[in-house]
Image (cartoon, coloured by chain):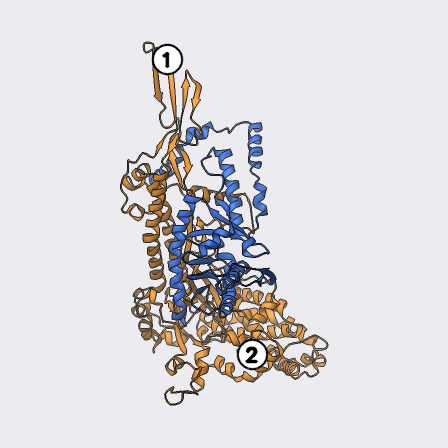
Amino acid sequence: MRAMRALFALPLLGLALAEQNPGPQYQDWTKYLLSQPDYRLEQVLKGKWPYLEVLRKDRLRDYQKGPCDPQKDPNQCKDRLPWAEAQAHEFRLPMSSLEATREVAKDLRKAWQRFEERYYWRVITALNNPAFYLAYCTFGLKGPDLDPPLPEVKLNIPSESLDTAMLDKLTPFDPGKMASAGLHSLDRYLPIPQIPREDFCDGLGMEILPIMYIPGFKVLIQGTEVFRTPGYPSKPLWFNWDAADARVKAAMEHAWQKYYPEYLREVAEILLKPRPSDPGSFLSNLGITDFANLGAPKVYLPIPWRGHLLNGGAVVAPVYTEMVPRDPQALWRSLEGMWNTYKGLIDRTGSEVEKVYYYVHFYRSARTLYNSRAFYGIPGLADTLKQGLVRLIESPLRTLTQGIPVLKGCTGSLDQVADCAASALMLVDGAVKLKGEVDKLTGGKPQDEPVKAGRESPGLWKYEEAKRWLPPASLPVYEAFGYTSFFQAMNILEATNIPDMRNIDLSQINASNWVGWAWSQLSRLIVYWHVPITIDIRIEYCPPCVLAYPSPPLEGPAQPLGVPPYTLPFVAERTHWRWVSVPEGYEIPGVKGTPYKVLGDLGGIAPDLSALYRPLLGR
Amino acid sequence: MKRWLLTAVVALSPALAQFDWLSNLDWGGISNNLQRVGAVMSCNPQSLSQLDFSQPSLVFRGVYKVTKCTLCLTLKMCGFPDDMLYPASWNEVLQGFNRGDIMIVGSGAGVEAILDYLILIAKGGTCQNISYGGVPIYTCPPGGMRISKAYVVTDTTTARRLKEKLKSLNDPNLFKVVGVGGERDSPELARVLLGLPLVWSGGKPYLFAPGYSTPDKWLWLTFDGPVSSKVALVVNIATRYVADAARREEETR
């Protein structure tokens, strides 16, 4: 409970800071905190699953005030949550694997693609009945099945969870996109359906009547054109607009009343059903006997934090890349990546003095990592890490310390330098808070705000907030650095067309970008295909007689006629997903209400997850 | 291999059916091609690089015009109407508010200004300043309108500000605000994902392109009749889901 103790040890300092800076303070708007990871790798060997603890701060606060009975003491209970609610302030969330959540994301995408195809092909087939009905519904003309690739893992840093003080220092702030941004589209826009005919031909019959159009024509006499109908060949002579309108309308209605709820249902099932469906037996089947064979079991254990529906919250799953890293080189590379991300951020937001702390902090976290018990018995892991780390940290840290008076005395081994620097920095922090002689300590290097700040949250807030930029990792890395990554899925309402015309990357406009985009839009226009004809009148020796015949279809090719609404409108909610990292003791973005409580509209879709996970978590 | 060939034939057959038409298009000759490029240039494709993405409804209009023109000139597909979006008068939008539910989808200052305006209408229409992105604008909306129910779907920052403003109304249930993406501010989410700014009024969809003025002076766009009825069909269904989402507010608390 390191995080929690620190959280409530500093309320007074919090108040002091609130007076200095008007405006919303971090501690005023935070509510859903990542409190404590309990990875218990030893426990995994005994058949228990690693989990996280999260808490609702508002409930914890009321809980700490002690029980309160509204019947006995109505005054004291004013503005307080019911005691039962206050007691339920802590929740355990089992870990899932990153790979499994990628597969979930892939299925979410596939569900969308299926809806997109069903919507379009229903409309276009109904409109071009009987020609398309024959081709797609009777003969079942069909392209390859939908099979989207595994979506990339992209880290999103939602500004909603970030401390506003950090945000101010990061202008311009680039939050990164949601992992799902722009992925609500097909991989290939083919001129034939990529779904089975049952998906869009349901309840559709062949309609030969009413007559949809009288074709446009041109008349040739002896090969010379003498007449053509207005608008030939683009427009037919007459088109049954009313019938076309009614057909499109009926098809759209069908899509929205049947296919769309089915999409929502499909998404809910993908998100809320654990994989494998029986996590208990899965764990016992893993046959884990020691740290070395923990591996990265593929498992998805979702937690509805009220649920993914619009205005409902999110479905979340904390993720690991693997339980214990096995490849020393890969681990070192990822650590280097973290170092670069972290350094870039602190360089932008930190003062000279704070940069020293960055080295110290990173060194200490990484030291915890290579001392991790989980690495015992995995040859080379701890040593590779240690050597790399010393190479990275030692000389820059020693150089930095020599430039700042208060740190000049820090010599000896790297451990000693780090410890000495940490306490010296606390000295600076104290001086800043008490408005002491900071300049003397820092040698004129400006340090206007406390390093620690008067925050309730644990750690040094800038270093903690910077963890939102760290990628998903293995359990020992999370433990050492004090953060965890989450997979989150939520619905967002969007008003656009299908395919989404906003799906163009404006950051890099080039020919192939435009062509792909234009093709997606053009290939999904709502058109009626009509065939203009050529009437060829010839005097031939047959014996001499006049022949007038329409040309065969290929000679006067089919022409598209746009039918309202030309492109399919979409105004509804659809499911997006993202991966976010949350520092220990800090706010979790995007969620609402209480974990495991599922929205009424989602009732009956998911099994009782808290009961299902109880044996896994051991309580 | 066989399967692949079959797929290719099947996939290409609609294209092959167009062969004659394609071959009738003028593909040959440098001068002809140059003419074609010249023709396409007359569609003003440069306008695509000058689109103002802060006004999505105008983007829609601009993209459609260029696409339609290019299709007709190059592929001889000329069966599309000149425009999909037409200017609508503010009076039309306003009269729609009298009839049935209102839904507003969008984010940022535009949505906020519309809601300010609606609140003034609901309160009884006195002349006042409303804020447009911090700029005060004096306006005198018509009083005495009866609004049955209004849903606003917007980003969380705007949602939070709107909820504060709605506290001044007597009927707290008149406007339902649905924030997108959790409980906190996430402007980047709204910018990327919310889409076209849309007002559903009197059973008809309107897109709007706000400028620095009051809603009665903005550019309002609506679709032609047959398009409008289809968009209306979709938005009408969306209002049901938004009503559910508004109800969820209580459930998640």
Residue A444 circle label: none
Left or right relative to A165: residue A288: left
State which quadrant residue A89 falls in.
bottom left
Q: Position of residue A344 (x, y in %)?
A: 60, 65
Secondary structure category for the residue under label 1 = strand
The reply, left or right, for residue B46 in relation to residue A107 is right
Chain B colour is blue
Rendering quarter of residue A75 = bottom left
Q: Secondary structure at mark 2?
A: loop
Evaluate whether residue A248 shows in this view: yes
Nearer the observer: mark 2 or 1; the answer is 1
Q: Which residue is mark 2?
A: A455
- Residue A565, image quadrant: top left
Circle 1 crowding by C-alpha within 10 Å: few under 14, some 14–19, many from 20? few
Q: Badge 1 sits on which subunit?
A: A
Q: Which residue carries the number 1 mark?
A: A539
Image colour assigned to chain A: orange
Inspect the image, locate mark 2, and give the three-letter code of the amino acid beneath it.
Arg
Mark 1 residue type:
Ile
Query: As displayed, is residue A214 above or below residue A353?
Result: above
Q: Nearer the viewer, residue A564 or A467?
A: A564
Quadrant in which the C terminus of chain A is drawn: bottom left
